Image (cartoon, helix red, strand yellow):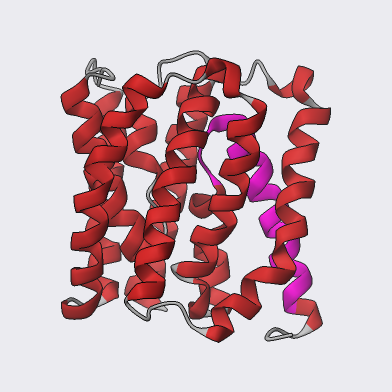
């Protein structure tokens, strides 16, 4: 096991909580878990966190499949393709610390703007742009949720979970494949992620078991809190750690 048992226990519990948060709000796995996991071992970024998100997204897509609208979410997936490709290029030529800081600041500004009488609607143009930014961020930092989540923040809960679940299933799959092809996914990273897969199942199962208590949680404030808190943590990590 790449991690000592005490650190592994902390990581395992963190992933369970993060999986529960994403199962409720549509995003949150990478946003909640990435800052802590990367502080423990930088090899968690980006491949292992993306892989955990891929597995959770598969469970969410299957569970909320009846609320899924393929036509609208496909525009975001079209945008994710060029975003992911450019993300691979950025990983080669630009320091990851700089990339993380820029995107964290951008997301904080986006959340603030969304609360100043400005609503971003899920139009084809907005979905494509959000998919592009999400692919760019997801491939470089493993955190690609906020851009696409902001588009759906005013939608009904099950629609958010279904749309984002399917989007991340396909989108993170793209990023993982590109990471392997570009040799940015190491053997150590595979060893880091495999023992954590049961934590994803536990977190998602908890969201289903306690669904009645969690279903009325307001989506927009939850997304905003998760996004800003995690982005501030990223800024702190990149500036001071």
Q: Position of residue 25 (x, y in %)?
A: 56, 31
Q: Position of residue 107 (x, y in %)?
A: 29, 44
Tell whether position 203 is magenta.
no
Q: Position of residue 216 (x, y in %)?
A: 65, 15
Q: Quadrant of the N terminus?
A: bottom right
The span shown in magenta is 7-28
- Residue 109 appears anywhere in the view: no
73 vs 120, left or right, is right
Judging depth in this view, the residue of 128 and 13 nearest the camera is: 128
Tell whether position 26 is magenta.
yes
| Residue 240 higher or lower than 103, as above or below | below
Please give the name of the residue rendered at 20% of the width and 27% of the height, measured from the top-left corner.
126
Please give the name of the residue rendered at 45% of the width and 54% of the height, measured from the top-left corner.
173
Number of marks in the rendered image: 0
132 vs 154, left or right, is left
Please give the name of the residue rendered at 25% of the width and 68% of the height, measured from the top-left corner.
88
Q: Which SS does the magenta portion mostly show?
A: helix
Q: Quadrant of residue 158?
A: top right
Q: Position of residue 64 (x, y in %)?
A: 61, 24
Q: Quadrant of the C terminus?
A: bottom left
């Amino acid at each position: 096991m790449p991690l000592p048992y005490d650190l592994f226990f902390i990581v395992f519990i963190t992933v369970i909580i993060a999986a529960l948060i994403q199962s409720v709000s549509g995003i949150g796995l990478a946003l909640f878990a990435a800052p802590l996991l990367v502080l423990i071992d930088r090899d968690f970024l980006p491949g292992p966190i993306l892989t955990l998100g891929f597995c959770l997204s598969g469970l969410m897509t299957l569970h909320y499949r009846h609320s899924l609208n393929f036509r609208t979410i496909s525009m975001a997936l079209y945008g994710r393709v060029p975003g992911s490709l450019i993300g691979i290029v950025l990983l080669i030529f630009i320091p990851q610390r700089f990339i993380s800081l820029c995107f964290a600041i951008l997301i904080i500004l986006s959340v603030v703007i969304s609360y100043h009488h400005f609503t971003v609607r899920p139009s084809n143009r907005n979905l494509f742009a959000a998919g592009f930014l999400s692919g760019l961020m997801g491939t470089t930092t493993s955190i690609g949720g906020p851009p696409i989540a902001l588009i759906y923040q005013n939608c009904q809960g099950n629609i958010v979970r279904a749309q984002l679940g399917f989007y991340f299933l396909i989108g993170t799959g793209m990023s993982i494949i590109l990471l392997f092809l570009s040799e940015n996914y190491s053997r150590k990273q595979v060893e880091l992620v495999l023992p954590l897969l049961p934590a994803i199942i536990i977190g998602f199962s908890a969201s289903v078991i306690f669904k009645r208590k969690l279903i009325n949680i307001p989506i927009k404030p939850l997304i905003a809190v998760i996004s800003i808190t995690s982005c501030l943590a990223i800024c702190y990590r990149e500036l001071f750690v």
